[in-house]
Amino acid sequence: MLSKLPINLDKVSQEDIDREIARIGMIAELDAVNLYEQLAQMAQDETLKKVLLDIAKEEKTHLGEFQAILLKKDPEQAEELKKGKEEVAQLSQ
């Protein structure tokens, strides 16, 4: 994503704005995790590699924060996430 919004927030209703901002935040955090983990794989300096992986881990925490907000703002999303977890649990039995 690299700092480009995936949607035009000016066209989002006031009712949906916070949910969409949370989703954009989640996208940005996932993008950052992927970037830092890829850079860590390429890094030759072990300290740099450790720093990149530590930062990637922090971004995962940020992702969880945005997800927590989204699930409060969007009960349907919370229910579908729960269903998804249940489906995976059934498939992995």
Image (cartoon, rainbow, N blue to C red):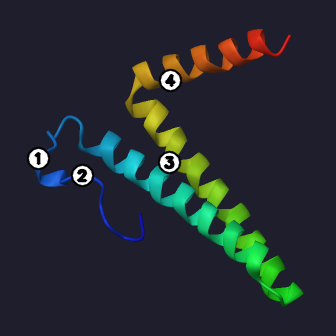
Q: Secondary structure at mark 1?
A: helix
Q: CA distance from mark 3 to mark 1?
A: 21 Å
Question: Where is residue 1 drawn, in percent x and y?
Answer: 41, 63
Give the mark, 4 or 1, whose residue is nearer the N terminus: 1
Residue that mark 3 sits on: 66
The disc placed on residue 11 is 1
Tell me: 85 left or right of 26: right
> Would you name the residue on which mark 4 appears?
78
Q: Which mark is residue 7?
A: 2
Whether pointer 1 and pointer 2 mark residues with C-beta atoms closer than 8 Å, the reply is yes
Q: Are marks 3 and 1 in contact (CB under 8 Å)?
A: no
* Front residue of 23 and 93: 93
Residue 87 in the figure: left or right of residue 69: right
Q: Secondary structure at mark 2?
A: loop
Q: Position of residue 9 (x, y in %)?
A: 19, 52
- CA separation, marks 4 and 3? 13 Å
